[in-house]
Amino acid sequence: MGLTFLTIAFLGYFLLLFLVAFYAERRGRSQKSIVNNPYTYALSLAVYCTAWTYFGSIGRAATDGYGFLPIYLGPTIFAPLWIFFLVKIIRISKAQRINSIADFISARYGKATLPGVVAAIIAIFSTIPYISIQLKGIVFCLDILSGQTGKVNSDIPFFEDSAMYISVALAIFAILFGTRNVDPNERHEGLVAAIAFESVFKLIAFLAAGIFIVYGIYGGFGELFRQAYAMPEVADILSFSQADIQGESWFFLLLLSGLAVLFLPRQFHVAVVENTNARFVKKAAWLFPLYLLLINFFVLPIATAGLLHYNGGAIDPDTFILQLPLDYGYSYLALFIALGGVSAGASMVIIAVTALTIMLSNNLLMPLLIRSRQMKSPYLSEFHKSVLGIRRVGVFMILLMTYGYYKSIGQQYTIVSIGLISFVAVAQFAPAIIGGLYWKRATKAGATAGMIGGFVIWAITLPVLNLIEVGILPQSMMTEGIFGLSIVQPQSLFGLDMPDQISHSAFWSLLINVGLYFFVSLSGNPSAEEIAQADYFVNFSKYQKEGLEYEIIQREANFDSLRLLLIRYLGEEKVDNDIKAFEEKYKLSTRGMTLAPTELVNYLETSLAGALGAASANVVINSIVKEKPISLEEMLKVLDQTQEVIQYSRQLEISRAELEAATRQLRTANEQLKELDEMKAEFISTVTHELRTPITSIKSLATIISDQPDLDPTEKTRFLGIIMTESERLARMVNQVLDIEKLQNRKNRRLEQTEINLRERIEKSLSSIEKLAEARGIQLLFSPDKAHYDILGNRDHLMQILINILSNAMKFCANPGGQITLQLSEADDHVQLSIADNGIGIEAEKQELIFEKFTQIQSGQTGKPDGSGLGLFITKKLVERQGGSIWVESKLGEGATFFLKFPKVE
Amino acid sequence: MPFTNPEVVCSMGKDLKTVLLVDDEPNILVPLEFLVRNKGYRTLTASNGRQALKVMEKVQPDLILLDVMMPEMNGFETARQIRQNPDWANIHIIFLTAKGTSEDKIQGYTSGGEVYLTKPFDNEELLNTIDETLEFG
């Protein structure tokens, strides 16, 4: 295939990419985003599958069989955890406008510069070789299709080197769509759309290749594998035993790839920075593994086919996917497949370069620049334009470094090994990030020490080792160790041998990293700013739920100078929009404001962090704010107690309410007591009055009888009768007063309750009053069935109740022709007794009153009340103490019926 | 059952002074009536204040022996109403009651009573008081 044609085809592909990106940006501007959905999000995550997947996996499968798999199994295994873990990272990042993984680490550890610098350096050092390998992959496609294999790239002058032009094209793309604006929170829709498009493109291309090779060449899986099993050296790769991978290797590869899928700079960029909605993670957690499954489906079949076709590897297995269609004369299909590979490489380069550029400018260049600028004059130039300038220069710097690496040593590595080396490097972020999210005590020093330690071990055990192997560093280092320390041997550090170098490096670097992270964190004390950020990150849900802004440190600034300062970095329009948004959010006007409050300072700092990174924004803002001093102790107190204070104040609220309720109850009780006291006084005065009356009568009459011996006998008999009646009344009254006293004293004591046959009791009470009733001509009517009507109660009290009600009825029933009717009935849980008389009846208003103390109504028999007014009161109390109730129904002139209700025996 | 008609009981006799006995307890009216009549006065009885006033409209007594705690109209109120009528200015009022606190006594005097006796009373003392009140009061 001619080079010109190929160049046109490649350019055409890039043009298509540009169009997709432009289209997406335009749609995004008119609020009809094609990026804002979980499918695009999942596809953008597939930037994970690079040229390495496309070509390298087949190469690996051709030698190791299933050995290519762990890199894809790791993310699949860890994906369910994203729902908690990744979502938290995304939410925090959105709230703090974090725009790179280095920024995340910097922000978590007190917005400090140092951890960000270390993280950025690790990211850049580990990613540049990785990017260069993608360039190699793209060039590799060109070479195979044009048939120019075997040429050594370093011999070509750069102006003739296709890699050079590809780099420039990718740089332009990254500049146009990745560094279009300063605030990455105004996301890069074009970039994401292009990546998603490329993910679809590479998947289709790879599947097309697989289908062509399996079905087109071999007529299906059956035939392919039948032929493969016929050749033992080919059949080997189809069995797991051939997979040249040990247990430890599996473990480390799964772990590393599980971490890399989030912590590689480009992965963090698409998964967190470019994420438009944290809820998409839920869907992506199964869509992304599905994508991995699809794209890996044909890896082993293609490798098998290649081995069969080329008789066990006459050519590089990485090229099988292109060579097979070419050999069968399908050059356009080969071109299509090659473009799939190009898209896999290009998407990785674009995102990685964008992510690295943000880190380079925000975490490395910006802090330097701000510091030097502040020394001179902070408000001199329109800095925000230079921020973009720095970014653009950054893109070229990164690609230049990549190209340089590609030209010098990049040629020596296979695609797979460079990828894995990068994986181990970014795994060094894991302790600082994961620990930072869940361990409040972690410090800046601990995170920095851990990352540096891990990075150094990584450098010794992987890049240095490789440099020795390719002959750039002296071979003697292998045996004698680095720096002349025999214990520091790149291949077996501290004398430990592992089945492969990746596991060896991962084991030692992560062990040292985690160890330093913990011990250094625990041995030092975090600063106030660190504690504030630690609390924000670890207890993020608290800040969200309570709507709390993290604003532990009180900072104020002159409003005008704050605004001017920000305009330097962000431009006037953006700053005024931010201030407007602040006003809306806090319902606070900034008109005529001289001193900007803490909330505004924090708000604008967050906005600035989007452009400069957390650490630099912090430095810029702190240059003009007056910080109200706050001691570390205060700070610790505030943070430790926030939660407690909230709980405590809730408890206080509860106890306040309880107190109020208690006060109310006390007041009521007091009033009741007062009332009771008054009632008692009244009771006593009433009782004395009631007692004095019979005594007066008795005393006076007795004196008369005694003084007048010649008293008329009839008169004397009459007087004696009165004396006897009044004496009885007196005795009855005393008994009743004693009853009341007993009732009140026994209020809290348990009453002795037994099973009582109510019918029998009624019959007994009736017989005791029979004679009296007969004397007064009163008819007693009671004709129950044979049922027992067993109730639970106190025998003596029941007797008293019945006698009281019956004598009451006798007193008030018609005269002559008195009639008292008793009736028993039974319900589910109680027995009811009604006692009806045919007397004068009780007025409706008095029906309740009669159960009170000292209320009397005129007796039908005597025309005059002759009771104490205590009888029914006592009766009611007694009934209630048995758990029963009593009430009366009556109409004036038609008699009265008393109802008694007692609980039944179960 | 002992029974005293609560309506007016009037034992006529010339030149005899008349005493109105007011109490809601028939069994107290019985000894009072016996004692006062035996002493040579005419007696009238009423079972509450309202009844007493009704009786007085027909027959004006010289002295009233007045209970305090009675239904319909109590003794203090009855005394007050009697004192409001200038025709009854000469009628003596003696309270005879079970209410014996000093507040009760003060209320008794302010409402127009001349003597305040408490139940249970001494027969002789009561009669002497009635005599003295009628003679010197």
Image (cartoon, helix red, strand yellow):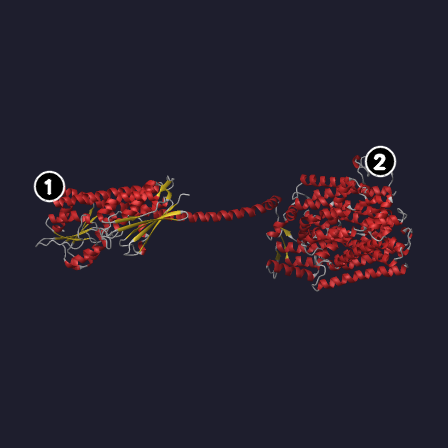
Q: Is residue A617 above or below residue A749?
A: below
x and y percentages locating residue A525 in the rendered image: 66, 41
Residue holding disc 1: A709
**Left or right of A644: which side holds A72?**
right
* View extreme (front): residue: A786
x and y percentages locating residue A402 in the rendered image: 83, 51
Residue beneath the point at 86% across and 61% down: A8
Helix, strand or loop under label 1: loop
In the figure, residue A595 lies in which quadrant? bottom right
**Left or right of A219: which side holds A685?**
left
The residues tagged by marks 1 and 2 sit, at their Cα atoms, a distance apart of: 148 Å
Residue type beneath disc 2: Glu
* View extreme (left): residue: B14
Helix, strand or loop under label 2: helix
Q: Are marks 1 and 2 on the same chain?
A: yes
The numbered dot on residue A10 is none
Residue holding disc 2: A480
x and y percentages locating residue A147 in the rendered image: 91, 55
Mark 1 — on which chain does it sit? A
Q: Is residue A85 above or below residue A332?
A: above
